[in-house]
Image (tube, rainbow, N blue to C red):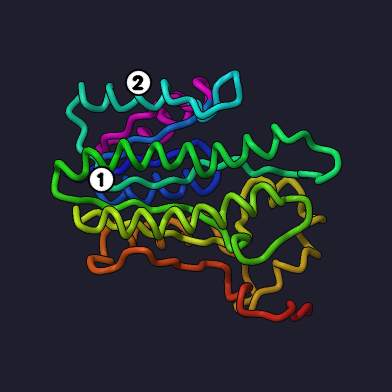
Amino acid sequence: MKTVLITGACINTGVAIVKKFASEGWKVLFTGRDEKRTKTAEKEYKSLFPNAQIKGYVINSINSEGAVDEKSIDELFTEFDKNGEKIDCLVLNAADQGLNMKIFENPLSDFIRVINTNVVWNYRLVECTAQRMKQNGGGSVVFINSNTAYRAIPDRIAYETSKGAQLGMMRGLALDLGKYNIRVNAVLPGMIKTDRWEKNPEFYASLPSRFTPLQDVAVGEDIADGVWYFATSARNTTGAELVIDGGNSIQLYPIVK
């Protein structure tokens, strides 16, 4: 049985990714920031997939000083080693969205927090996982990135910066880890129908990025399918980007109908 570790898997896209791997017979390890939410998610997953092995772990990305919480990561992997967990695929889904980041209003610490979470924290997770994958003959790492790495949107400068940096890191990791049969790739979603979509239907009804060439917006299952491809079917693919945005990124401007 193969094992996947999925970060940020208590809500939205993370849920869809967990369900995809669990339905395919993988052992699923997932993380969340909040203990209550993580335990609730684990219980729900087990009820949906009673024959699957699914376990949730609570982990913090940033400590009280605003730095990457290395201790939390080390403790997580110490527990994995103790339990004999062999991770075949790491899916880096957790992110700080950096919402409403006003360049002249937000303190520098807000910008640093987003970068630390989306870039530095993810690097440390890859480093720890890759050390084990190297010993086990290889594996797959999949970043959940964003088409905002290439297309900016208002008041999200820290997030956009982090996603651009993340792609550079992905390519560097793919080059350095390839010799160990560790593949590193990225899925780049556009707009996704998450809980924010459901809570603000009027706002999203007229948002330009919803007007895609395919005339539809991705759901979590679409992103999970992209992750699944990189995890299981992309034997000779590394350092690659898979955009899942209904064709939104190819447009000079949206065709509003």
| Residue 114 lies in quadrant | top right
Q: Secondary structure at mark 1?
A: loop
Q: Earlier in the sequence, mark 1 or mark 2?
A: 1
Q: Residue at x 72, y 50 (%)?
A: 156
For the residue pair 77 and 33, the one nearer the viewer reads as 77
For the residue pair 206 and 48, the one nearer the viewer reads as 206
Q: Residue at x 33, y 61 (%)?
A: 230
Residue tagged by mark 1? Answer: 26
Horizontal side, residue 220 vs residue 141: left or right: right
Please tell me how crowded label 2 is: few (under 14), some (14-19), or many (20+) other residues with Cα within 10 Å. Answer: few
Horizontal side, residue 139 vs residue 144: left or right: left
Tell me where the magenta segment starts and ends, as one range: 34-59
For the residue pair 46 and 170, the one nearer the viewer reads as 170
Examine the structure image and report whether residue 40 is included in the region drawn in magenta.
Answer: yes
Q: Amino acid at mark 2?
A: Glu
Determine the CA span between mark 1 and mark 2.
23 Å
Q: Please state the horizontal and vertical placement of residue 182, each as a whole percent of the image.
A: 25, 54
- Quadrant position of the C terminus in the picture: bottom right
Residue tagged by mark 2? Answer: 75
Of circles 1 and 2, the one toward us is 2
- Quadrant position of the N terminus in the picture: top left
Q: Please state the horizontal and vertical placement of residue 180, each as a whole percent of the image.
A: 19, 53
Which labelled disc corresponds to residue 220?
none
Q: How many marks?
A: 2
Q: Please state the horizontal and vertical placement of residue 227, each as a whole percent of the image.
A: 39, 57
Examine the structure image and report whether residue 38 is included in the region drawn in magenta.
Answer: yes
Q: Amino acid at mark 1?
A: Trp
Q: Secondary structure at mark 2?
A: helix
Q: Residue at x 44, y 66 (%)?
A: 241
